[in-house]
Image (cartoon, rainbow, N blue to C red):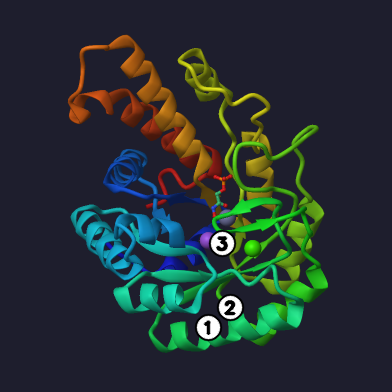
Amino acid sequence: PYVDTKVILENADKNGYGVPALNINNLEFLHYIIEAGVKMNSPVIIETSQGAMKYAGNGDFRKGAELFVKMVKTFADEVDIPVALHLDHGKDFEYIVTAIKAGYSSVMIDASEHPFEENMKRTKEIVRIAHAAGVSVEAELGQLAGVEDEAVAAENVLVNPEEAKIFVEETGVDFLAPAVGTSHGAFKFKGEAKIDYDRIKKVKEYTKIPLVLHGASSVVPEFVEIAEKHGADFGGAKGVPADILREAVKCGINKVNTDTDLRIAFVAGLREFLNNNPKEFDPRKYFKLAKEYTIKVISDRMEVLGSAGKA
Ligand SMILES: O=C(COP(=O)(O)O)NO
Ligand SMILES: [Ca+2]
Ligand code: NA
Ligand SMILES: [Zn+2]
């Protein structure tokens, strides 16, 4: 069934596991996520960025939002696992309100590049509107380096746990994304991968709400290698290893935003298949390996995060 993201995350919080929040831009990735969720008996949070809304609507983000809600609801109504649709990195008021109007389960207001007071003000405004419509809200404190859809943050600004306490009390936000050392994309760490567990624990202790880890892709070496064997150049790619994800969940993370891993698995399968099947041009065939690898990476992540078997 199609559910409110809050239902999924409160269950995850109560039972101490993480749920993958998986970004889509098209029908194929939605297919693969649902298939993995059903196979693993895991709840799933589908999420789309503002750019994905524009892309799906061929430039018209309102059409894109409508399309995503129809697609996700169609799949959700057919399966027994809980399925939610979330607007990821909502920055612009009209995109966020459009997602609410279209029927998204939840929306993120990402005002984290603004000063604390401004972030609170913008978040409060969205919480008031979203809650009036029965929609839950995610906000962000601190900054992740790397590209965040449109905005590019220079470097990491880690969350201040005391600020997080005030922020959640003042805004009434339903879940919070604290910046704790990750970043978006495939090049997360120059040195060894590490995130600030202490900050996660403190933010959890002070806010007692479900927490979100952004930039959580592992950048799985197996798929990086396959992609590079077939012409990709991802030199220096490094993500958040499974053991760090498990520890982050133990410290209080419940929603684990994962986009890059799906992209790498898909392109690895696509490159391998195309290289080995020069005569093939039927998309229902040449996406086959891409589909297999993407379902595999999602299924493995559900095991790592503990959402497998929890639907
Ligand atoms: O935070 C993410 C995805 O992060 P990755 O690039 O690590 O998949 N989406 O909001
Ligand atoms: Ca941000
Ligand atoms: Na999000
Ligand atoms: Zn993110």
- Residue 164 is drawn in which quadrant? bottom right
Depth check, mark 2 against mark 3: the one in front is: 2
- Please give left or right for residue 12 compared with residue 154 in the image: left
Q: Provide residue 195's location: percent of width, then percent of height.
A: 76, 46
Element marked by disc 1: helix
Label 2 – label 3 distance at C-alpha: 15 Å
Mark yes or no: residue 303 visible: no
Element marked by disc 3: helix
* Label annotation for residue 31: none
- Please give left or right for residue 104 compared with residue 210 in the image: left
Q: Residue at x 78, y 64 (%)?
A: 202
Q: Is mark 3 within 8 Å of ligand 3?
A: no
Q: Provide residue 305's location: percent of width, then percent of height.
A: 54, 44
Mark yes or no: residue 244 visible: yes
- Please give left or right for residue 74 compared with residue 289 in the image: left
Which residue is labeled 2 in the image? 173
Q: Is residue 308 above or below residue 204?
A: above
Q: Residue at x 21, y 17 (%)?
A: 280
- Determine the quadrant in which ligand 2 lies: bottom right
* Label annotation for residue 127: 1
Element marked by disc 2: loop
The type of residue carrying mark 3 is Asp
The answer to whether the residues at label 1 and label 2 have Cβ atoms under 8 Å apart is: yes
Upstream in the sequence, badge 3 or badge 1?
Answer: 3
The type of residue carrying mark 2 is Val
The answer to whether the residues at label 3 and label 1 have Cβ atoms under 8 Å apart is: no
Label 3 – label 1 distance at C-alpha: 21 Å
Upstream in the sequence, badge 1 or badge 2?
Answer: 1
Which residue is labeled 3 in the image? 13
